[in-house]
Amino acid sequence: MQENKKPLISICIPTYNRAKMLEESLNKMLYQLTTSELLDFIEVIISDNDSKDNTKELVTKLAKEYNNIRYYRNNHNIWWLANIMKVAEYANWKYIWLLSDDDCVTDFSLWYILEIINKENFDVMFCNSVSSENMNIEIKKGKNTYHVFDGISKYLNYLKNNYKWYKNLISFFSFYSILIIKTEYFRTGVLNFQSNINWNDFPHDIVTYHNLVNKRIIIPNNTFVIWRLLNEWYVWSVKLIKTFNQCMNFIESQNKLDGNPDWNYLKKICKSWWTKNIILWLITWKLHVNYKTNKIFKKIYYFYKKWIQ
């Protein structure tokens, strides 16, 4: 990988009562680490939000086998939003990769990501992702290519002209697994905007987008993350729509995007997409419909997701 071996990535996983999914995610990750020379460059940090299942036993056992796994357990449930930020506090390596406990990395992702890190001193990477209920789906592996943007304006212009990538921007507001952030940049965001983070339902947005005016942004072409399509969760309240708008306003003000046509276009699409999603979940809640098991609604759900995307 490189002559002077230096630890590079802290993969930070907040978790709560998802031992089975977490085990699947860790196994895919550890397979890559143990079948290559990546162990020296990557650590895995898990913050357990006082799970009531066998998470502690599972991770403790793995930590005894792999010295690059660190496990922390909260004394009580501090809520999932706070746990996202909590797990990142334990990271000391060059980059933080926030990864949900129910998502998996693709079979070649870790090696490719480290290759990019060795070539580019970026601040934020937005990984490509794919949704599936099967974490063992075959993902096409292409040449390790990527796009580099010096500043948020060039990044937004690219998103506007590339449909699949502005979908990634939208999903980011609830889906943090696509984020790899320079630890120094992450810490600055937390330090300067802690009060904003505390009230927001999207704390990772505040940290990631707090100042990308002159920062280096990477978008790889390969898919690095697999997320479970039918595993979304929202607080059943339109409050999220208000909070989402507040977060967009924060991003706009911090990055001086007022009047930027690319930003205005993407913001409009993001708000529309988010509002439609909340309305969908409110309907299912009021009708007491389980969208995972109801066959009719499941078909409607898939059609709807395809339509809005």
Image (cartoon, rainbow, N blue to C red):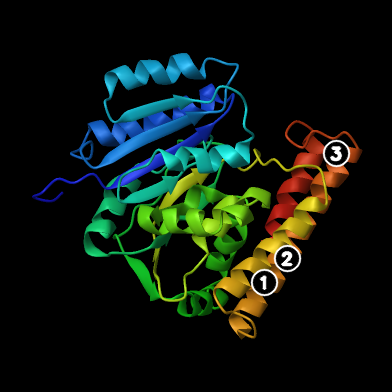
Residues under numbered marks 2 and 1 in contact, where contact means CB atoms less than 8 Å apart? yes
Name the residue beneath numbered marker 2: 271
Is residue 294 placed above or below 123 in the rendered structure?
Answer: above
Is residue 83 placed above or below 156 in the rendered structure?
Answer: above
Nearest to the eye among marks 3 and 1: give it. 1
Is residue 161 placed above or below 273 in the rendered structure?
Answer: below
Q: Residue at x 82, y 46 (%)?
A: 237
- How far is disc 3 from disc 1 in space, using C-alphas? 27 Å
Q: Which residue appears farthest toward the left when viewing the image?
A: 3
Looking at the rendering, which quadrant does residue 136 occupy?
top left
Name the residue beneath numbered marker 3: 285
Q: Is residue 113 left or right of residue 265?
A: left
Name the residue beneath numbered marker 1: 267
- Can residue 34 be seen at all in this image of the molecule? yes
- How far is disc 2 from disc 3 in space, using C-alphas? 21 Å
| On-image quarter of the C terminus | bottom right
Q: Residue 90's spot in the image, x, y percent? A: 40, 38
- How far is disc 2 from disc 1 in space, using C-alphas? 6 Å
Q: Residues within 10 Å of mark 3 (few under 14, many from 20)?
A: few
Give the residue type at disc 2.
Lys
Give the residue type at disc 1.
Lys
Give the mark, 3 or 1, whose residue is nearer the N terminus: 1
Decide which of 286, 135 is in the foreground and name it.
286
